[in-house]
Image (tube, rainbow, N blue to C red):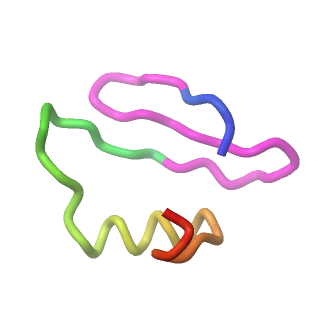
């Protein structure tokens, strides 16, 4: 994924040549819930082994 843009408490990420934009909520040190993490990985066309 390319560089990100911060909009409030969300970081927006995109990749060159793709129309997909990921909005990742960032609330202090709180971890992402597993369902949201899996959804973001799917949208980014990544697997758990990629991270």
Task: Please determine whether, in this image, residue 46 is positioned above or below residue 19.
Answer: below
Is 17 contained in the magenta span? yes
The residue located at (39%, 45%) in the rendering is 24
Q: Would residue 16 appear left or right of 4 to someone viewing this image? A: right
Image height of 28 relative to 14, above or below = above
Q: Residue at x 61, y 48 (%)?
A: 21
Residue drawn at (65%, 71%) of the image: 45
Q: Is residue 14 magenta?
A: yes
- Residue located farthest toward the right when viewing the structure as drawn: 17
> How far across and down, in percent of the image, does residue 36 sit?
32, 66
User: Which x, y percent locates residue 50?
Assistant: 56, 68
Q: How many marks?
A: 0
Residue 16 screen position, x and y as percent: 82, 42
The answer to which quarter of the image holds residue 47 is bottom right
Tell me what residue is drawn at x 20 percent, y 65 percent: 33
Snapshot quadrant of residue 30: top left
In the displayed structure image, the side of residue 42 where residue 33 appears, left or right? left
Residue 44, above or below 20: below
Q: Which region of the structure is painted magenta?
A: 5-22
């Amino acid at each position: 994924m390319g560089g990100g843009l911060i909009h409030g408490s969300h970081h927006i990420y995109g990749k060159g040549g793709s129309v997909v934009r990921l909005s990742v909520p960032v609330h202090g040190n709180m971890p992402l819930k597993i369902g949201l993490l899996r959804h973001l990985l799917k949208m980014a066309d990544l697997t758990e082994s990629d991270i």
